[in-house]
Amino acid sequence: MHDSLTKKNPQPSAEPLPWTCPFCPLLCDDITLARTDDQRLAAPHTACPRLTESLARFDPKQANTPPAIDGHATDLASALSQAGSILSAARRPLFGGLATDVAGARALYELAAHCGAILDHLHGDTLADTNRALQDRGVFFTTLSEIRSRADLIVVFACAPSRRYPRFYERVIAQERDVSIVFVGCDVDPDSPQAESILPGTDPFDTLALWSAHIKGGRPIASTELTTLTERINKAHYTAFIYEPSALPTQHAALAIEALQRIVKAINRTARAGALALTGDDGALSVNQAITWLSGFPLRTRVAYGLPLDHDAHRYRTETLLKRNEIDALVWISSFAPEPLPASLSDTVPAIILGHPSTTLPARQAPTVFIPVATPGIDSGGHLFRVDTSVVAPLAAARESVLPTVASIATQLAQARRPQ
């Protein structure tokens, strides 16, 4: 259906292009792209500041961005050779950032397994919190479609969804349906439809503890707001609980997620409810799903052919590894946006950057290789998991580009890596 978007075409079409946006895990697929007079991409009919900001990063001239070694422009063959030498010498490399699509994740896993590398994502903390709740207690997730078609009550816990996901309400609330929205532990999101707020500014752990005791054990509590909300949930046809892992307190966020999921499970004894975690930015869910399918473990796992897999969500956290100087090379992948190298990376650790063409290259003491790569959905096709992990959306290239994909570079690096 989208073949026309990926064929070479020296004269860019003036016709609007149907398109799926790769810049947030909602993966909105109703967007019409157009080209401006200077051949930049724009979405004039979609009111989404995140999309507008993301498209502004792409200049038609970026396709000519060359690879670089230690800040000096070079050709792709030389960059691959130098990167292969870095990986050949490494004994404990970290593959970080991992902002890519499913194909990129699969190819990077193969390369990592040859190198004995550790895998962690740019949003590894929120992924680890969600994974831990799933591993320890299980979860009761719902989908965008189920919320849109069934929910008559939406409970938003301690977050403002439109802050990072501007089209959230548009995606989950059908115009013809009457849906009530209650914000718990925070103010009403200014972009939400008519809604109300209870217990704004309260400690989320205190709120969850009281609520859990009431719902699971039937204990009376002093909070009339929570008691009233529970009664509304019991009378509702279907309740959707919405939370954003990155908006929860940094310390012990996994416990808050676990507590909220326990409440949802308890409600399902007598009513119907499901939860949706707003997370998965920069391909995080896609990479986590791909790595779990390939290895049996989620991210923050060390993979190596011939050795047992080793998963540890705490020990293999990027910041922990860097601050303890436990790696001897970093492969940093950031294909959706020009994410900088971690500030805690030692200047003496060699780095390979597979990044957005507009990435700013720092001056470093250690060997540093930069290879500009295609952005899925802009320069190349691809696939991403949606926020509810129930849909894998195909992406079509929005412009003609010669930039290589992360998957192709990872495959070539596997071939360029030379045993010592």
Image (cartoon, rainbow, N blue to C red):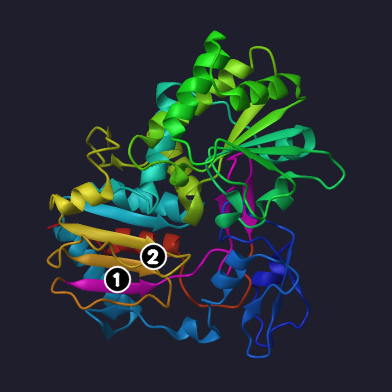
Q: Secondary structure at mark 2?
A: helix
Q: Are marks 1 and 2 in contact (CB under 8 Å)?
A: yes
In front of the other: 339 or 353: 339
Within 10 angstroms of label 1, few (less than 14), some, or many (20 or more) residues?
Answer: many
- Give the class, few, some or many, for how many residues have Cα within 10 Å of label 2's Cα (few <14, many ≥20): many
Q: How many marks?
A: 2
Give coordinates of residue 369: x percent, y percent.
Answer: 26, 72
Residue, disc 2 = 409
Residue furthest right in the image: 176
Q: Magenta includes 380?
A: yes
- Please name the amino acid that badge 1 sits on: Leu
Residues in magenta? 367-395
Q: Amino acid at mark 2?
A: Ile
Q: Which mark is residue 80?
A: 1
Mark carried by residue 141 = none
Q: Where residue 23 appears, x then y in whole percent? A: 56, 61
Query: With 126 as the anchor, is 95 left or right in this view?
Result: left
Q: Which residue occupies the foreground of this view, 24 or 295?
A: 24
Q: Residue at x 21, y 47 (%)?
A: 320
